[in-house]
Image (cartoon, rainbow, N blue to C red):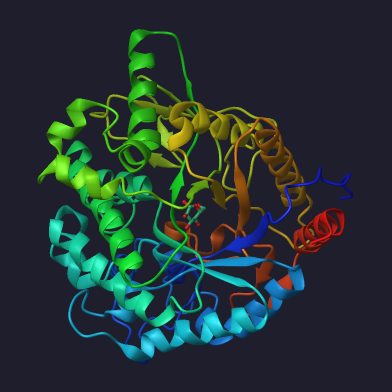
Amino acid sequence: MTTSPLPAFPPGFLWGASASAFQTEGAADAEGKGPSGWDAFAAQGRIKDGADASRGTGFHERYREDVALLAGLGADAFRFSVSWPRVIPGGSGPVNSRGLDFYDRLVDELCAHGITPAPTLYHWDTPLPLDEAGGWLRRETAQRFAEYAAVVADRLADRVPMWITINEPAEVILLGYALGEHAPGKQLLFDALPAAHHQLLAHGLAVQALRAAGADNIGLAVSHSPVRTAGTSDEDRFGAELYDTLTNWMFADPILTGAYPDEDFATLMPGPVAEDLAVISAPLDWYGVNYYQPMLVGAPATDALDDFAGIAMPAELPFGIRRLESEQRTAFDWAVVPDGLRELLVGLRDRFGDRLPPIHITENGCSYDGIDDQRRIAFLDGHLRALHRAIDAGVDVRGYFTWSLTDNIEWVEGASQRFGLVHIDYDTLERTPKASYAWYRDAIAAQRAGSGN
Ligand code: BGC
């Protein structure tokens, strides 16, 4: 697909790609790594086709190939994640220096190619012993996370100029603790709220620990989706507003304003909430946004329409998620709505004003099959244009990390949903750049030529 050139992004804009440890590394018990809650979840057969992530994309062995692919793209930065159970297998206690050595090698390889390493410290793979003790339902887990953050920063902060504490806390809570569709498989519905508070606290304590260890340029990656109301009844409006609050604002508000979106939430949270909020809202250098699609939400539905990415929603929940119609859909059946990215960014700016730090898009991408992935090109082109419109509207966006560099293990969907610019043959682990890889490479090159960078 030939697309007309993208409008020029601001000078110094960071072009990148994202990935995560559980989804790519494999080597699940190599070099002293301990199991994560996700390894245990996979062992229970919870991933499609009984798959697990023990091989992943082979990134642990093949990271040099993937760094070469990033270099071939002309990427400025790579967002990967550090596996907590690779570094501290027990979740607390001894540090596995061989685990840290892997990230040392990876960071060196990236730096040798002039690519900024941007590690995420938590992309969902909690060390199993912590999960078994209650995971994010326990306040201690936040403390353990901060200790782990300090260990990683001690080793890498001399070469890592950009840090991400936590990825998508809302998904961890909703899917992992409320609905039980992700590890650790708990179905607590609203009793999952304490886990949200502890994850927020973990973020705040990790920011402190990172800064104390000399790390700088710290943000996190939060998913945001514009919420549309399905229907016109009071129940529809209530359902949509509650869903919006739970998924868009329950994490953003405490981090950016020091308050929960609704006083009622604060009263449901454990611990010295006011003191915790002061830690949680410590200033960030930037704020990361992951965007995939808007959500259509209303009153609980009584029929099969009521699902969330194929997940049945329990009838006790006061909201229901409907299928949002759109002309284009991804292989995951997600709606393709590029302008939703502009809409949500302008919405963040309007809601938070001066409290909103500069933004990086830390994830945006789509699942499609095939190597001649023209629909991924159209998706990226459309979303980058929408992003440019947000910048034109005055939103300070500094970078874009597409999800994902390579196909990878899409959580419970296993290898069945492919988000990569690079195809993975899961039998041979051979990497084949797709048409979208060449498109993104050319788009980055054109931006550079245009800005003289
Ligand atoms: C997650 C990724 C995931 C992607 C696509 C985000 O929720 O951070 O790990 O692969 O979306 O589902």
Left or right of 369, for residue 230: left
- At a point 30% along the width and 39% down the height, the residue shown is 254
Q: Considering depth in this image, is 132 or 214 the residue closer to the camera?
A: 214
User: Residue 87, located in which quarter of the rendered image?
Assistant: bottom left
Q: 424 or 258: nearer the eye?
A: 258
The quarter of the picture where the C terminus appears is bottom right
The residue shown at (53%, 80%) is: 107
Q: Residue at x 39, y 84 (%)?
A: 100
Q: Is residue 428 visible?
A: no
Q: Is residue 125 above or below residue 28?
A: above
Q: Nearer the viewer, residue 257 or 424?
A: 257
Horizontal side of residue 64 vs 50, given as left or right: right
Q: Quadrant of residue 156?
A: bottom left
- Residue at 31 percent of width and 77 percent of height: 151
Q: Tell whether 451 sits left or right of 152.
A: right
Give coordinates of residue 152: x percent, y percent. 36, 76
Indicate whether 35 appears above or below 338: below
Residue occupying the far top of the picture: 233
Is residue 87 shown to the viewer in this render? yes
